[in-house]
Image (cartoon, helix red, strand yellow):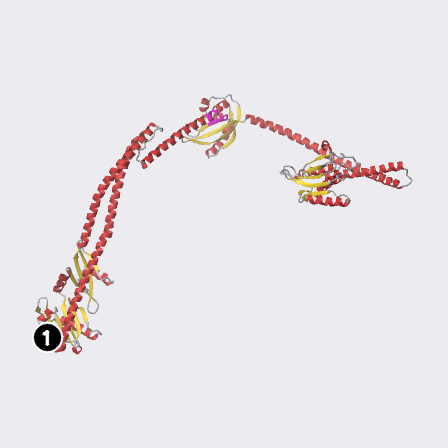
Amino acid sequence: MCTSGAWAPRVAMNISRKTILVIVSTFIGLVFILAITSDFILLNSFANLENKLLGESIAKLKYEIRESLDDMESCARDYVALVQKGGASEIGTLDTDSLVNHHVDFVAVYNAAGELLSAKSADYHYRRPAGLDDGLVQCLGKTALFAIKGKDRHLKGAIRNGARLHQVVVRPCAGGGVLLVGRNIDREEIAQLSDISEFALEIRQVRDEGLPADFKEALADLGDGASFHAVPLDESHIAGYALFNDINGQPLFIAKLTERRLLYQQGKASITYILAALCVAGFVFCCVMLFFVRETVLKRLGILSATVRQISNDSDISSRLKVTEHNDELDDLALTINGMLDSLERAEVTLREREEQYRILFERAPDSILLLGTEGDESGRIVAANKASAIQHGYTVEELCGMSIHDLNVPESNEASADWMERIFSGQWITFEVWHFRKDGARFPLEVHAGPVKLNGKNYILGFDRDITSRKLAEETDHMYMEQIRQLNTELARQANGLEAANSELEAFNYSVSHDLRGPLTRISGYSQLILEEAALDSQTRSYVTRIYESSCWLNEMIDAMLRLAQLARSEFQPQQVDLSAIVESLSIDFRAAEPERRPEVVIAPGLTVVGDLRLLKILLTNLFSNAWKYTAHSPSPRIEFGALHNGPVPVFFISDTGAGFDMKDVDRLFRVFTRLHDPGQFAGNGIGLATVQRIVNRHGGRIWAEGEPQKGATFYFTLQPDNPSVSRSFAS
C-alpha cells in the first residue's frame, strides 16, 4: 500500500510531461512536415517557374539572333541587287557608313568557282573601316563553295573561323556566284545582346579545349535533345545554357545566360515568414492546450488517483468516487471504478460466504479430510484435518496437524505410497485403499480419493478418506454367502438332472403303456365290431357290446392324444415367419367342407403374422378354432372371430365365439389335462386340446387366458412372445 501511495504522484507528473511532449512533438512534426512539404512542393514550384522564365529568356536570345540574321538577309538582298546592277566591283566601292548603317561587318562576292571577286569590311560597332584577314577569306570561300554546290544557295547561320565566330547570310547572285553578308560575334556583339535581353551572356565554342565543366555538363544534357539546360549557381543566381548550330546544322557554340534568382528568393522568404508565424501560433496553441488539458483532465485525474489511492490504503471498498457533472470520459472512468468497487464488494461478500460454507463442509463432513504439504518443511506433513478425521484416528485435530502421513500409514502402505505420490504429482486424482493406525495401535482400512490442489501459491495434496471396515466385513460375508449359493446351485443342478431323468423315464413309461395298450384295445374294438355284425344278438347284449366298442374307441383316441402331448415336449422348436390369418382361413374352409350344412359367420383379421414354429402354431389354432366351431353348433347366431389387440407391449391374439361359453368360476380348470366343463353327450372331446394349446403357448414364451359367460360365448386370448421384448424367444425351448 505504501508503495502505491509513493508511486501515484510520479504517475501524475509523468502524464503531464508526456502530454507536453506529445503536444510539442506533434507541433514540431507538423512544422517539419510543412517545411519539407514547402521545400518539395512550393520551392520546387518556384524553381519550375524560375526554369520556365529562364527558358523564356533563352527563347528571347534565340529570337534576337534570328532577328539579327533576318536583318542581314534583308541587307543581303539590297547588296545582291547592287551587284546585279553594277557588277561585283560595286561591293568594293561601298563606304564604311553603308556597312555601319546595315549593321554588318563584311560583304563579299564569290564566283561559281569559290574565288573572291570583291569584298568590303568594317567594324560597325566602332564605325570604322576594317580589313578581311586571310583566315576569314578562306572560311567565307568554303562557305560559298558549300552553298554553290548545295541544292539551296540561300543559307544563313553561324560559322567558325578559328577562335572567332561569325554570323553569315548567303544569297545567290548573277553568274552563278554567291554574296555573303556577315557580322562578327565578338565581345561588343555579346554585350549588345546582353543589354537587349537584360541578362549576363557568355558564349563558348563546342570545340574549345578549355571548355569549363559546367559547359561540358550542359553540352551532355543538350546533346540528349533538351531544349535548354538550367543549373542553380548559388542561392542568388541561376544559369541557363542553349546550344546553337552552324550554317551546316552541326553544334557550334553554347550560350550561357546568368540571371538573379529573385522569384526563388522571394518564395523562400515567404515560406520562412509562414513557418515563423506557424511557430508562434503553435507555441500559443501549445500553451492553451496544456492549460486546457491540465485544468480539464490532469487535475481531475489527479483527484481520481488520490481518491483511489486512499481507498487502497484504507482497504475500504465501500467508499465511492465522486462523479462530476461534466458527463465526459473521466466521469465514465469514475463510474466504472465505482462499478468495479461494487463488484469487488459483492465478490468479497460472496467469497466470505463461500469460505464459511467450505469451512462448515470441511469441519462437518462425515468423511475424513486431510491436507498434506508437498514443499519444504511441510512435505509429507498434515497441514489441516477435519473433526471426522480426528475421531476416525482417535486423535484431536491439533495432534493430527503436528503429525506426518507416514506416522498414520502402516508399513505396507508406506512402501506402496511412492507409486501413489508419483501419480498424484503428475496431476491425477486417484482412488486407492490404504491401512492406517489408530491412536490405540489398531489397524483399519480406508478408501482414499486424493489429488493435487494449489492454495495461496503452494502445492498440496487433498485427500478424502472413508473407513471401509464395514464394507470389508460385508465383502467377506458376501464371499461366504456366494460359496453357499454355489453349493446350493450345485445341489439344484443335481436335482434338476434327476428330475429330467425321471421325466424322461415317465415319458418313456407313458409311451410304453400307450403302445402296449393300443394292441389289446384294437383287438377289443375289432371283436366288438364283429359281434355287432351278428344279427342274432338280443337287444341288451347288443347294447353291452356297443358300449364296449365305443369305450375302446374313446380310449384309443385318449392314447393318441397323450402321445401327441408327449411329442410336443420332445419336438425341436423351429422359428419362422408365420401367417396366422392364413392358417385360420384354411381351417375355416376345411371345417365348412366337412360340415357344409353349417353356416356360422367367421371373421378373420387379415395380415396377422408372428415369428414361431409353424407346425406347433397350426396345432394351437386348430384346437382353438375346433373348440369354437364345436361349441357354436347349438347357437342360434353362430359367430367366430379371429383378431389381435395392439394396446400392450406385445400383440394379443384372440379367438372368440358365441357358443356355449363357460362359468368364470371354472376358468382355472380349463387348461388341465382330461378336464371337461361340458356334458360329453352334447359336445365330444377328450380334455387334451386346451392343455396342448397352453403347452404350445408356453414354448413360445407367451401366456394364455380365457373369458366366458354361459350361453353367450367364450374368448381365448394368447400371446406368442414374452411381455418383455428383450427376453429371447428361446425361452420356450
Do we see residue 689 in this rendering? yes
Q: Residue at x 22, y 45 (%)?
A: 278
Relative height, residue 662 to residue 202 (above, below) = above
Q: Residue at x 18, y 66 (%)?
A: 66
Q: Residue furthest bottom?
A: 175
> What residue type is disc 1 on?
Gly
The magenta-colored residue range is: 360-370
Do we see residue 209 in this rendering? no
Q: Residue at x 23, y 52 (%)?
A: 42
Provide residue 645's location: percent of width, then percent of height: 65, 39
Q: Which residue is mark 1?
A: 92
Relative height, residue 74 to residue 290 (above, below) = below
Give the left or right position of residue 428, taking residue 533 as reference: left
Q: Is residue 109 magenta?
A: no
Which quadrant of the view contains residue 480? top right
Relative height, residue 252 to residue 667 (above, below) = below
Quarter of the figure that contains the C terminus: top right
Q: Is residue 366 magenta?
A: yes
Relative height, residue 683 to residue 475 (above, below) = below
Q: Residue furthest right?
A: 536
Q: Residue furthest front?
A: 636
Which residue is more in the foreground, 5 or 618?
A: 618
Total numbered badges shown on the rendered structure: 1
**10 Å crowding of disc 1: few (<14), some (14-19), many (20+):** some
Which residue is more in the foreground, 615 or 238?
A: 615
Provide residue 568's location: percent of width, then percent of height: 73, 39
Provide residue 189's location: percent of width, then percent of height: 13, 65
Q: Secondary structure at mark 1?
A: helix
Provide residue 652's location: percent of width, then percent of height: 66, 39
Quarter of the figure that contains the N terminus: top left
